[in-house]
Image: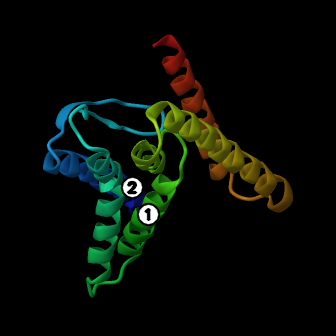
Amino acid sequence: MCASPHPFILILVYAIHELGHLVFATLVGAKMKKFKLGAFHLPPSYDSSHLSYQREILVCLGGIIFNLASALLALIFPIKSEGLTFFITASILLSLMNLYPASILDGAGALKALLYLLVSPPKADKIIGGVSVFAILLIWIISIYLQLVFYSNFSIFIISVILLIELCFSVSEQMQT
């Protein structure tokens, strides 16, 4: 019996995502500091002090762009397999998930940089904080609803709990600085 390739495909999809951030950060002139391991993600840390908000948006969306591009490239292969289908699906889903405006996801980073273009940074921080809390609580409530009504997959609930934990750590770090 053969082991499932799905865990390796997920690692590949995730590596492509992080490579997208790295490539875009390099293209816009950001200096990479390190990768920081989080409970749910591995965000690259880079010096963005000299970047415009437009370039910051590009770096935030770099992973999403790379995942969507890799899914599109995989679609042109004439070979059809379960592994390739899983790769395409995982790439698209990771992109969509990262567009969600929760504080630890790329969508919130891009929205924050966009808001910095439109309003003052303190006001943008308050808006993104409120949007992030709302977005995380919304996904948590939806996950509980799905569990109670449809006895659905437990994974959405787990993801929402991880997002809530990351949000608590993020708020704690902000209060210490």
What is the x, y in percent for residue 162? Answer: 58, 37
Query: Residue at horizontal 81%, vertical 62%?
Result: 150
Q: Is residue 146 above or below residue 169?
A: below
Which residue type carries mark 1? Ala
What is the x, y in percent for residue 1? Answer: 41, 63
Which residue type carries mark 2? Leu
- Residue sitting farthest toward the front: 119
What kind of element bears circle 1?
Answer: helix
Q: Is residue 104 above or below residue 66?
A: above
Q: Mark 2 highlights which residue?
A: 10
Name the quadrant of the C terminus.
Answer: top left
Q: Is residue 3 left or right of residue 54?
A: right
Residue 50 visible, this angle:
yes
Q: Do the residues bearing badges 1 and 2 touch, measured as CB atoms within 8 Å?
A: yes
Mark nearer the N terminus (1 vs 2) = 2
- Residue sitting farthest toward the right: 149
Residue 158 visible, this angle:
no
Identify which residue, 79 or 57, lies in the foreground: 57
What is the x, y in percent for residue 174? Answer: 50, 20
